[in-house]
Image (cartoon, rainbow, N blue to C red):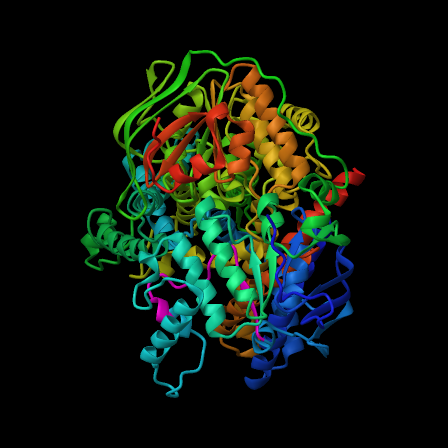
C-alpha cells in the first residue's frame, strides 16, 4: 500500500537533523542520545508508547525545551531553538491534537492571527482571504475563508490548521495524532493532502499509534521506547507485528480468545432517547439501543457525534429529555448518578483525569471515591482507613497497577495505571452493566492489552458491557456487536462477523446501513 | 516530611520579608526598628499577661480561620466572616436575653449553639445561592456583611436595646448586662483569660477530624479539588457547597458569640460598623487561614502569631509613638508574601516537575522498582 515518494531521496541532505539528543528531568531521562532526521519531501513517523519520549523530542524541536546534550541542525546549519518563535522563524510548524483555533473568529482571522499585516497595524483580511483561496486550490483544501471556526466540522478545522501552516510557508511540519478525529474516508483525503505537501519538498513528522496509517503514509518509521531510539525502518522492511514489538519491547499477544456466546437477556434497553447537547442542539435524537448480558456492545463513531452525551445520559450525569432507559426492566432515566450506580451500572469515563480521578487524592482515596460511605469503608460517618487501604492494596495487586505506594497522589501515575485502577474500581462492584468510554485512549499498549483482557473476562462472567470508542480497531477487536452513531442518530448495529472497516466507515460518515 | 519543611520555611521567610519591609517603614517614621520589634514581641509573648492577652485576641481569628479552611477545602471562598460573626453574636445574645433565668449548664451550651446557628444561617444563604444559581460567593458574602451590620444596628438601637438606655435617654446602642450564667467561665481571673480559647482549640481539632477522618470531609475535599469527578462518583456537589458554607459560617458565628460573652462588659455593643464588633477578625481570619496553609491545625499557631501582632501593635504605639495601623500594613505584607510564594511552594513540593512525558516515566520507573 505504501508508495515511496519520488522526491524523498536518501542522498539528499537532511532538512532536519537532531543528533544525540538527551533530556533529563529529575529522576528520569526523557530522551537519551536520540538521533532523528527528516529529508525534504519525506514523511518520517515517530512511533512509541505514551511516555516513550516522543513529545519531549518534539518539544525540543519546537523550542519549548532545551536539550541537555545534543545538537539540532536545520539544512546543515546548527541552530539553537530557544522558544517557539525561533522555531516558527525557521519555518517549523506543529499541529496539535487539540486544535489551536479561536472559535469566534473566521478562518481568515485565525490564519492572520499572530502575523504582521501588510498594512502595518491595520489588518488586511482581503489579502489573507485571497492567499487562502489560492492555497486551497493548490492543495485541494476546500475551506471558506469567511466562515467562522465554530461553524466548521472537525475535519474542516484540521484543514484550517494545515492552511495556517502553509500560509506561514512551513517547511517542516509536526502532526501530533492528526487522524484521531477523522473517519476512515476522511483519513484517505487527508493523506492525499499530506502527499501533496511532501511533493513540494516539505518534510513531515507524523506522530501516531495507528499501525495501518503508519504503514500507509510513512517513508521511514522511527520507534522510541523509554526515551531511547529503538530503531529506524521503512514500511517495506517491517510489519505491524514487528513495529508493535519494537514499541513494547516484547511480543504482543492477540486477545481474540474463545468466548462463550452471549445470552439473549437484555440488560440495558434504550428506547427513543433524546438528550440535549452543550450548544443547545440535541446531541441524541430518537436513539434506540440494547445491550445484552454477557456481551460487549461497541459504539463506534467519529468524535463528537453524541457518544459522550449517551454515556452521560445513561449514568445520570445529563438530563434525559425524552425516551426511556431500562436496566433489566427497571426505569433508570432521570435518576441521579448515585442512584444509577446503586441500581447496578458502573461507568469508566472518557476523561479520566477530569471525571474519573482526583489527581491530588491518593490512589487509596480514589479507589473508594464512589463508595467511601458504604458499610465496608465507613463506620458512623468516620472513614475506616484500615479497610480502605487493605481493599486498595488488593485491587492494585489484582489489576497490576504500577504505583510506588497506595498513598501516592493519583496524578503521579501514568495514564495507563490511572486507567487500570479506575477499571478495577468500576468492575469491583460487580455491576450488571459497565459503560466504558474510550477505555484505552492515551494508554500504553501493555496496559491497553491488560484492560481489554479484563473487560473480556467481565463479559464472560455475564456483565453487559458497552464500549464507546473512537478507535475502530479497538471496537472491532472487543465487540460482539457494533453500533454506529453519527450526528446523534443510530446508524445501525452490525454483528462483528459482518463488520468491515469500509462498511463501518460509511456508517460513521452518515450513510445508513443497508441491511 | 520534606513538604512540611518547605511549607514552614516559606512561611517563616514570608514573615521575615514582611518584617524587613516593615522595618523600613519604622525607619521612615523615625523609630528604631529593632527596638520596635522587641517591644512588640515582649508585649505579645514576653509575659504571662501578654500571652493571655494574645490568646484572647487569637480566639476569633482561630475560629474564623478554621471556618475559612473548611470552606476553602471545598473551593468556596468565604469573605463573609464579619457578617457571620455579627449574626452569630446577635443569635447568641437574643437567646441569652430570652432565657435569663437558665442555669449555666443550660445557658452556656444554648448561647454557643445559638451563635453557631446564626453564623451557619448567614453562611448557608450565599452557599445556596452559589450552588443553585451560580452566584459568586465572594460578592454575596461581602454584601451580606453589610446587611448583617445594618441588622445589628437596627436590633441594638431598637428591639434589643438596654431598657436603661431608654430610661436615661442616652440611647447608646447596646444590650443590657447579659445574664451572669452566660459569662464564659474564666481560666484565670488575674490574667483575664476566659475559656473561649479552649472552645477554639477544640473546634480546630474537630475541624481537622471532620476534614480528614470522616465521609463528610472526604466529600467536601473531593468537591473542592475536582467537582466533575465528585459528581461522576455520585456525590451531591450542590449540597456539599452548601454544607461547606454552613459549617464555615457556624465557626464564625461561634466566634461572634464568644466575643459577646467573653467581653469585659458582657454586653453586645455596636459603634455602627462591623469592625467595631469584630475587630476585623472576619477578614483577618482569612489571613490566618492562608498563613496556616488552609490547615485547621496550622491555623492554631498562625492565629497566635497574628493575635500577638495585634497586641504588640498597641504597645508599639504607646512606646514608640508609631501608629498601630502599621501592623495592619504588616499583616497585609505577610499575606502578599505568603500568597505570592504559593507558586514557589507548589513547585518545590512537587518536584520532579509535572511535565507529562516525564511524570509518566517517573511513575512507571518507580513502579517497576517497587
The magenta span reads: A91-109
Q: What's the magenta bit mostly, secondary-structure-wise?
A: loop
Residue B7: x and y in percent read: 66, 56
B190 relative to A396 in the view: left or right:
left
Residue B168: image quadrant is: bottom left
- Residue B181 appears in the figure: no
A57 in the magenta segment: no
Residue A354: x and y in percent read: 50, 44
Count how many numbered circles sit on residues in the image: 0
Residue B305: image quadrant is: bottom right
Of residues A63 and B212, the one nearer the viewer is A63
Residue A121: image quadrant is: bottom left
Q: Residue at x 57, y 28 (%)?
A: A425
Of residues A426 and A289, the one nearer the viewer is A289
- Residue A155 appears in the figure: yes
Q: Residue at x 56, y 64 (%)?
A: B309
Q: Residue at x 34, y 36 (%)?
A: A318
Of residues B199 and A338, the one nearer the viewer is A338
Residue A378: x and y in percent read: 55, 23
Residue A291: x and y in percent read: 42, 21
A369 relative to A223 in the view: left or right:
left
User: Where's the C terminus of chain A, which quadrant?
Assistant: top left
- Single out the residue that lies furthest toward the bottom: A120
A106 in the magenta segment: yes
Q: Is residue B240 above or below residue B305?
A: above
Of residues A311 and A453, the one nearer the viewer is A453
Q: Residue at x 56, y 24 (%)?
A: A427
Amino acid at each position: 500500500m505504501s508508495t515511496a515518494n519520488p522526491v524523498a531521496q536518501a542522498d539528499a541532505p537532511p532538512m532536519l537533523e537532531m543528533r544525540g539528543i538527551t533530556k533529563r528531568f529529575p529522576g528520569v531521562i526523557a530522551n537519551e542520545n536520540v538521533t532523528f532526521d527528516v529529508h525534504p519531501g519525506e514523511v518520517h513517523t515517530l512511533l512509541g508508547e505514551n511516555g516513550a519520549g516522543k513529545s519531549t523530542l518534539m518539544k525540543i524541536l519546537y523550542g519549548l525545551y532545551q536539550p541537555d546534550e545534543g545538537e539540532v541542525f536545520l539544512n546543515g546549519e546548527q541552530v539553537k531553538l530557544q522558544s517557539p518563535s525561533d522555531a516558527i522563524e525557521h519555518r517549523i510548524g506543529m499541529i496539535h491534537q487539540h486544535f489551536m483555533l479561536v472559535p469566534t473568529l473566521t478562518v481568515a482571522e485565525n490564519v492572520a492571527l499572530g502575523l504582521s499585516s501588510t498594512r502595518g497595524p491595520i489588518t488586511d483580511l482581503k489579502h489573507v482571504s485571497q492567499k487562502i483561496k489560492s492555497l486551497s486550490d493548490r492543495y485541494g483544501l476546500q475551506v471558506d475563508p469567511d466562515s467562522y471556526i465554530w461553524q466548521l466540522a472537525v475535519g474542516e478545522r484540521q484543514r484550517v490548521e494545515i492552511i495556517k501552516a502553509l500560509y506561514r510557508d512551513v517547511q517542516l511540519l509536526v502532526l501530533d495524532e492528526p487522524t484521531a478525529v477523522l473517519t476512515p474516508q476522511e483519513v484517505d483525503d487527508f493523506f492525499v493532502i499530506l502527499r501533496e505537501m511532501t511533493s513540494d519538498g516539505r518534510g513531515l513528522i507524523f506522530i501516531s499509534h495507528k499501525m495501518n496509517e503508519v504503514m500507509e503514509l510513512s517513508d521511514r518509521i522511527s520507534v522510541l521506547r523509554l526515551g531511547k531510539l529503538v530503531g529506524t525502518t521503512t514500511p517495506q522492511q517491517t510489519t505491524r507485528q514487528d513495529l508493535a514489538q519494537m514499541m513494547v519491547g516484547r511480543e504482543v499477544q492477540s486477545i481474540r480468545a474463545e468466548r462463550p456466546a452471549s445470552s439473549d437477556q437484555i440488560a440495558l434497553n434504550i428506547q427513543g432517547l433524546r438528550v440535549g447537547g452543550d450548544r443547545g442542539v440535541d446531541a441524541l435524537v430518537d436513539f434506540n439501543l440494547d445491550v445484552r448480558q454477557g456481551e460487549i456492545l461497541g459504539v463506534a463513531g467519529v468524535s463528537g457525534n453524541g457518544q459522550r452525551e449517551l454515556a452521560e445520559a445513561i449514568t445520570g450525569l445529563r438530563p434525559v429529555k425524552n425516551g426511556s432507559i431500562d436496566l433489566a426492566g427497571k426505569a433508570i432515566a432521570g435518576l441521579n448518578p448515585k442512584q444509577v450506580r446503586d441500581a447496578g451500572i458502573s461507568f469508566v469515563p472518557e476523561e479520566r483525569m477530569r471525571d474519573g480521578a482526583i489527581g491530588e487524592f491518593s490512589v487509596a482515596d480514589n479507589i473508594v471515591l464512589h463508595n467511601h460511605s458504604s458499610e465496608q469503608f465507613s463506620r458512623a460517618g468516620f472513614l475506616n482507613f484500615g479497610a480502605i487501604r487493605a481493599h486498595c492494596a488488593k485491587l492494585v495487586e489484582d489489576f497490576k497497577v504500577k504505583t510506588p505506594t497506595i498513598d501516592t497522589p493519583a496524578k503521579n501515575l501514568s495514564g495507563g495505571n490511572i486507567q487500570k485502577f479506575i477499571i478495577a474500581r468500576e468492575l469491583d462492584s460487580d455491576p450488571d452493566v459497565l459503560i466504558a468510554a474510550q477505555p484505552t485512549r492515551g494508554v500504553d499498549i501493555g496496559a491497553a492489552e491488560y484492560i481489554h483482557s479484563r473487560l473480556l473476562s467481565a463479559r464472560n462472567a455475564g456483565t453487559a458491557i458497552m464500549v464507546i470508542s473512537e478507535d475502530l480497531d479497538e471496537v472491532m477487536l472487543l465487540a460482539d456487536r457494533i453500533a454506529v452513531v453519527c450526528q446523534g442518530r443510530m446508524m445501525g448495529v452490525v454483528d462483528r462477523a459482518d463488520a468491515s472497516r469500509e462498511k463501518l466507515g460509511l456508517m460513521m460518515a452518515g450513510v445508513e446501513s443497508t441491511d | 516530611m520534606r513538604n512540611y519543611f518547605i511549607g514552614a520555611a516559606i512561611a517563616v521567610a514570608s514573615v521575615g520579608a514582611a518584617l524587613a519591609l516593615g522595618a523600613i517603614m519604622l525607619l521612615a517614621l523615625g523609630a528604631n526598628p529593632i527596638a520596635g520589634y522587641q517591644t512588640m514581641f515582649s508585649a505579645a509573648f514576653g509575659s504571662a499577661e501578654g500571652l493571655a492577652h494574645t490568646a484572647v485576641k487569637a480566639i476569633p481569628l482561630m475560629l474564623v480561620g478554621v471556618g475559612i479552611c473548611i470552606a476553602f477545602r471545598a473551593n468556596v471562598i468565604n469573605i463573609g466572616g464579619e457578617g457571620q460573626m455579627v449574626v452569630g453574636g446577635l443569635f447568641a445574645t437574643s437567646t441569652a436575653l430570652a432565657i435569663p433565668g437558665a442555669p449555666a449548664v443550660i445557658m452556656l451550651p444554648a448561647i454557643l449553639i445559638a451563635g453557631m446557628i446564626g453564623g451557619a444561617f448567614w453562611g448557608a444563604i450565599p452557599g445556596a445561592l452559589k450552588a443553585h444559581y451560580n452566584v459568586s460567593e465572594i460578592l454575596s458574602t461581602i454584601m451580606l456583611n453589610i446587611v448583617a451590620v445594618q441588622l445589628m444596628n437596627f436590633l441594638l438601637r431598637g428591639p434589643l436595646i438596654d431598657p436603661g438606655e431608654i430610661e436615661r435617654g442616652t440611647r447608646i446602642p447596646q444590650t443590657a448586662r447579659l445574664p451572669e450564667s452566660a459569662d464564659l467561665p474564666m481560666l484565670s481571673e488575674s490574667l483575664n483569660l476566659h475559656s473561649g480559647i479552649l472552645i477554639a482549640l477544640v473546634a480546630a481539632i474537630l475541624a481537622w477530624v471532620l476534614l480528614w477522618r470522616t465521609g463528610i470531609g472526604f466529600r467536601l475535599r473531593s468537591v473542592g479539588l475536582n467537582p466533575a469527578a465528585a459528581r461522576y462518583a455520585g456525590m451531591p456537589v450542590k449540597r456539599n457547597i452548601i454544607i461547606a458554607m454552613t459549617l464555615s459560617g457556624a465557626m464564625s458565628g461561634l466566634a461572634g458569640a464568644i466575643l459577646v460573652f467573653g467581653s469585659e462588659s458582657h454586653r453586645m455593643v455596636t459603634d455602627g460598623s462591623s469592625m467595631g464588633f469584630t475587630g476585623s477578625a472576619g477578614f483577618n481570619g482569612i489571613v490566618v487561614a492562608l498563613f496556616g496553609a488552609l490547615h485547621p491545625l496550622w491555623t492554631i499557631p498562625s492565629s497566635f502569631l497574628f493575635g500577638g501582632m495585634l497586641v504588640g501593635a498597641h504597645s508599639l504605639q504607646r512606646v514608640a509613638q508609631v501608629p498601630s495601623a502599621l501592623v495592619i500594613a504588616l499583616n497585609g505584607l505577610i499575606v502578599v508574601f505568603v500568597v505570592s510564594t504559593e507558586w514557589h511552594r507548589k513547585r518545590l513540593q512537587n518536584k520532579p516537575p509535572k511535565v507529562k512525558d516525564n511524570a509518566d516515566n517517573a511513575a512507571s520507573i518507580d513502579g517497576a522498582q517497587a
